[in-house]
Amino acid sequence: MLAELKKRLIKFKEKLEQSKKQKKRSGKRGIKKEGLQAVLVGFTQSGKSSIMKLLTNTNPAIDAYNFVTKELLLGALNYEGITMQVIDMPAINSEYCDFGIVNTADTLLIVVSSLREIDEIEKFISKTFGKRIIVFNKADKLTENEKRKIESYLKSRRYNFVIISALTGENINELKEKIVQSYDIIRVYSKEPGKNPSERPFVLPKSSIVMDVAKKIRIPETQIKEILIWGPSSKFPGQKVGLKHELKDKDIVEIRTK
C-alpha cells in the first residue's frame, strides 16, 4: 500500500514539474505576427542578443551566463523604408524556446560561431519552412585566412550567409540587406519629373509591374503620357517602358502625365 502511494506521489510530482515547464515556455508568448518577420535562433552565447541590439536598437540582457535569454524579445528593424519584426529567441536547445514562432517565421537567422553548430541547429529546425540565413558571428576573432576558409565552405554548401561581428558591427548592413532580400518583395522608388527619387520606397511583391506603381500613386491609366525607368530592370538610365514592364528591386519609376 505504501509503495503504491509513493509511486502515485512520484507520478504526481513529474506531472507537476512538466506543467511548470510548459507554463514557462508559453508564459511570454502571444507575439502577433505582423508583416515580415525574422527570428534569431542559435545556442547560448552565440551573440544573438548583441545582434538583436544592432538590428533593432533594443536592449536585451547580455552577459556571460548560459541561457540568459528566457523570454522572447520583439524588436523592429527599419531599413531603407521597410519595417520588419525581429524576434530574439531563447537558446534553441533550452526549454524556453518557442518552436511555434520558429515554425511560422518568414526568415530564420541562424547564428553560429563555428561550422559544426550549423548541423546541430538544423536538427532542431529541420521541419521549418522559413528561409535561412547563416549568420557567422565573432568575425573579430578570426584571421583573414580563417574567414576565407569559412566562406569557401559555406559557398560550397550553397548557404545564404554573412560573416559578421556583433562586437565591432562588421557587415551588419550586409545582414540587413540579406534579410530584406530573403522576402518575396521588391523596393520601388517613385520620382517626379525634375526631382530626386522619393526617400521611402513602395514595397511590392516580386514580379510587380509599372501599373502597380501607378495604382499606388493613384494616377489613372488614361492620364499617363510616358514612363521612364532607372535601375536593375532598365537597359539604360531613363529607359521608356510600358505599364506592363516588370520591375526589379530598387528600380526608380517616373510616370509623366498628360
Image: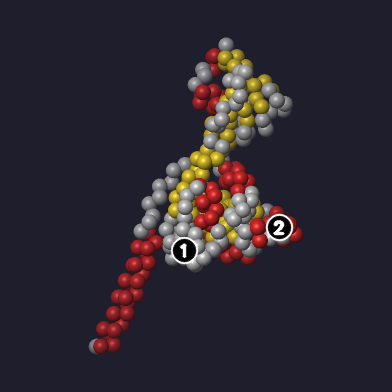
Which of the two residues, 106 or 179, is positioned nearer the viewer here?
A: 179
Would you name the residue on which mark 1 appears?
Answer: 68
Q: Which amino acid does label 1 sit on?
A: Val
- Residue in the image at 52% along x and 19% along y: 219
Point out residue 228 in the picture as x, y percentages from the top left corner.
Answer: 64, 21
Considering the numbered disc 1 on the image, is that residue within a helix, a strand or a loop? loop
Residue density around tag 2, few if under 14, some if 14–19, many if 20 or more, within 10 Å: some
Point out residue 165 in the picture as x, y percentages from the top left corner.
Answer: 62, 55
Point out residue 178 in the picture as x, y percentages from the top left corner.
Answer: 61, 46
Q: In which quarter of the image is the C terminus?
A: top right
Is any atom of residue 126 visible in this view?
no
Hey, which residue is sitting farthest left in the picture? 1
Q: In this view, does 243 lie above or below 36?
A: above
Q: In which quarter of the image is the N terminus?
A: bottom left
The quarter of the displayed image where residue 13 is located: bottom left
- Residue in the image at 64% along x and 51% along y: 170
Q: In this view, does 127 lie to the left or right of 2?
A: right
State the separation of the CA atoms marked 2 and 1.
Answer: 28 Å
Q: What residue type is labelled 2?
A: Lys
Would you name the residue on which mark 2 appears?
Answer: 147
Mark before the other along the chain sequence, 2 or 1? 1
Q: Is residue 68 above or below residue 171?
A: below
Hey, which residue is sitting farthest top in the picture? 258
Residue density around tag 1, few if under 14, some if 14–19, many if 20 or more, within 10 Å: some
Q: Identify the mark at residue 220; answer none if there is no mark.
A: none
- Residue in the image at 38% along x and 56% along y: 28
Is any atom of residue 186 visible in this view?
yes
Considering the numbered disc 2 on the image, is that residue within a helix, a strand or a loop? helix
Q: Is residue 227 above or below residue 87?
A: above
The answer to whether marks 2 and 1 mark residues whose Cβ atoms lie closer than 8 Å is no
